[in-house]
Structure formats: C-alpha cells, structure tokens
Image (cartoon, rainbow, N blue to C red):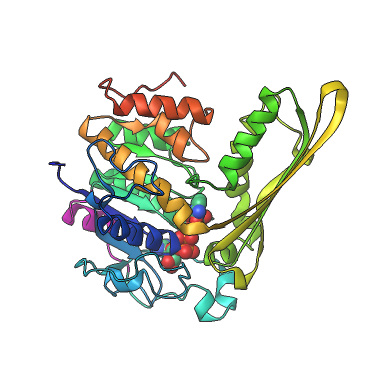
Amino acid sequence: MGKRKIRVAVTGVGNCASALIQGIEYYRHHPAEDLGLMHRELGGYLPEDLDIVAAFDVDRRKVGRPLQEAVLAPPNCIRPIWPNLPDYGVLVQMGPVLDGVAPHMREFPPERTFVVADEEPVAVDGVLKETRADIMVNYLPVGSGEATRYYAGCCLRAGVSLINCMPEFIASDPAWARQFEEKGIPLIGDDIKSQVGATIIHRVLARLFEERGAKIQRTYQLNTGGNTDFLNMLERNRLINKKISKTAAVQSQLSTPLADEDIHIGPSDYVPWQGDNKVCFLRIEAVNFCGVPLELEARLSVQDSPNSAGVVIDAIRFCQVARNRGEAGVLLPASAYLMKHPPRQMAEDEARRLLEAYLTDRGRDPRPVV
Ligand SMILES: NC(=O)c1ccc[n+]([C@@H]2O[C@H](COP(=O)([O-])OP(=O)(O)OC[C@H]3O[C@@H](n4cnc5c(N)ncnc54)[C@H](O)[C@@H]3O)[C@@H](O)[C@H]2O)c1
C-alpha cells in the first residue's frame, strides 16, 4: 500500500499477544481473505503491515526466547491459528514485575500459571526508542496497575502511542490523557472490547430493550474460562476495575442505570479444562407492554484471545493513521468503538459512524466535545 510498516511493541506475551501475532501471519498468508476482519484495509494499512519490533514479559519460559517461540510457550493455551511463525529477530525482554504477578498465581502448577524469570528488567523506554516503536500494546494481567503506569510512562518518554487493552484506567483517566496530549501522542483505551464478545452483545441487547420500550429490571453476565486471564481474576481484589469497566459498558446504554443490586457483570469462575474457551451466560429480566414480564437467556461460547485480536488489529491501525495525521491525546470514537471503558461512552452505531467518517478523511479526528 506504499506506506511504511507500523512498528509495534507488546507488553505481556500471553494468549492475546499470541492471537494477534498468529493472526497477522494468518492474513499475510491469505492475502485475498477478509473473513473475520472488520477492515482488511484500514487507512492504507493491511494486517500484515504490522511489524512486532519489541516484546516484554516476565515469565521464564518467554524472557530471552525468540518471539515466535515465546507466543507458543506455556502457560499460553490458545488454540493454534498460524503456529508456523517466522523468525522475527525479536527476543522477549524482561520487564519489571511490579504487581503483574499476583501472589495466588504462584500456588498453581507451572503449566497453568506464570513463573517469574530470575532476570534483571531492562529499561523499557530505552528499548522503545532503540527499536523505533510507534505503538505499544498493553496486554498485562488484570490488576497490574503499577506495571501499567510504568509502561505508560515509558511510552510518554519514548513518544510511543499506547493501546491499553486491559482495565487499568489510562485513556479514561484525565490526568494521564492530558500527559499524552501534551506530548503530542495519540492513544486508545481502556480495556479492549472483543469482536463479538459478551460486552458488545450485552450492550446491544440492552440498547434494543431500551429502544423498544422494554424496561430492564435485572441482568447478569457470568463468564467462565480456563486461561491465565481467568486464573488471575480469581483474586477478587484485582477485579475492581474490570467490574467497573464491564458494568459501565452496559449501564451506559440505559437511559436510567440499574441499581447496583440489579446488575451483576463479571468474570465468575476459572474452569481449567476450558482453556482459552470463554463461555458467557447472559440473562435479562424486563417488563414490556402493560408491564408484562419478559426474560431473555443467551449463552455465548468463544475462543477468548482471537476475539480480542480481531479488534486490536484495527486499534493499532487507527492509532497509526492518527499518528500520521498529527493527532494527540485520546482518540475518542476509536476508544468508544473498540474499548469497554473509553473516556466517553457512545452507542455502537454512533462510534462506528464517526470512525468510518474519520477514515474517509475529513482530515481531523471528529472528536465530540466531552
Ligand atoms: N478477549 C480477551 O481475551 C480480552 C478482552 C479484554 C481484555 N483482555 C485483557 O487483556 C489482558 C491480556 O490477556 P491475556 O489473555 O493475553 O492474558 P495472559 O494471562 O495470557 O497474559 C499476560 C502476560 O503478561 C505477562 N506479565 C505479567 N506481569 C508482567 C509484567 N510486569 N511485565 C510484562 N509482562 C508481564 C505474563 O507473563 C503473561 O505472559 C488481560 O488483562 C485481559 O483481561 C482480554
């Protein structure tokens, strides 16, 4: 497409990073295929225009290993998409552990959990500069607040954009957002909204009920899975922001938010044999015409990590388009469409319309007034 490649760094070489990297190879080898993509071409970029130039982790089975081996190393348990990966010439480097590894994770057998490497961390901002990264994708475990702030600070110092895929609030924290804006760096966040996942289905259904005059009275969304993301989330203290992010994503679609006791959304249990298969059980209780009751039950079964990669592959390209246009600060429509916890929630169709208008080039980010 005549543009230079997008130079991407990832932190957290877990299942989601693996899905993204295998997915890039999958589409590189299927050049005519747009199956499973929201955009084959976005702003002049194809999926295979993403080059991973740096990767950080803390697990001894990944640190110091070539990236193509690390993405397939345990405890990653993603179902293979394109496991025959080339040599990227990238070794996974040791990041600072900080709060990335929760104490309870150490109680499980190594094939199911993180095993911390005995290495000194590198200076991540220095590596970002040396590798001339454009964008960092944050894939740290839920609850890694300190570690996320460390990597976000490195991005600021290195002039690198951040795609914050997890529920620590950077894009949606005005103080952090301002710092990126002042440095002239665009970012997208927070907490990736999967392609067809529990959040978007719950949001769209909530909106549908609302628009059709059915008053939701109670709802839940229970999720189970067997990957390290779910194992990590057994520690409820780490879940506070995840619950805020997932609950606000649904509440924002209702004209009158439900009382706290009438909405329950969250990761609910770790079932080891499920591996990367996430199952969501969703229930909505409502009343419609003349107060007559209505109930909806849905069950969604997905491979969790590819479901997020299908969105990250667009987030990275949107962000690069914004970099090329000299935008700075939070990209609002992109964050609203692609993330669960943007600084400002929008309905899916509104965010999508604004994004597509941005791509067909009105020249500037059509950011609405916050
Ligand atoms: N559909 C989805 O899978 C989805 C959707 C929304 C959000 N997310 C979020 O994306 C994040 C990544 O998910 P995942 O399934 O890849 O998780 P994962 O558990 O497979 O991977 C996390 C990786 O981070 C590494 N790590 C831990 N501490 C670190 C540190 N200080 N520095 C660098 N690396 C560190 C671990 O060793 C591991 O490789 C999670 O927070 C998850 O909740 C995922």
* Front-lying residue, 110 or 305: 305
* Front-lying residue, 80 or 329: 80
Range of residues picked out in magenta: 121-133
Q: Is residue 323 above or below residue 367?
A: below
Q: Is residue 19 above or below residue 192?
A: below
Q: What residue is rendered at 60% in x and 35% in y?
A: 204
Residue 268 makes an appearance in the image: yes
What is the quadrant of residue 217 in the picture? top right
Q: What residue is rendered at 17% in x and 56% in y?
A: 130
Q: Is residue 105 above or below residue 10?
A: below
Instruction: Pick out the residue farthest to the left.
Output: 2
Residue 65 placed where, x, y %? 29, 75
Asked if the stretch drawn in magenta spans residue 123, the answer is: yes
Instruction: Pick out the residue farthest to the front.
Output: 32
Q: Is residue 242 above or below residue 69?
A: above
Q: What residue is rendered at 74% in x and 32% in y?
A: 258
Query: How many numbered badges does the structure rendering display?
Result: 0
Residue 96 placed where, x, y %? 38, 64
Residue 160 placed where, x, y %? 27, 45
Query: Taking 150 as reference, is 231 left or right?
Result: right
Quarter of the image with the N terminus in it: top left
Residue 12 makes an appearance in the image: no
Query: Taking 19 as reference, is 232 left or right?
Result: right
Residue 319 placed where, x, y %? 31, 39
What is the quadrant of residue 19 in the picture? bottom left
Asked if the stretch drawn in magenta spans residue 217, the answer is: no
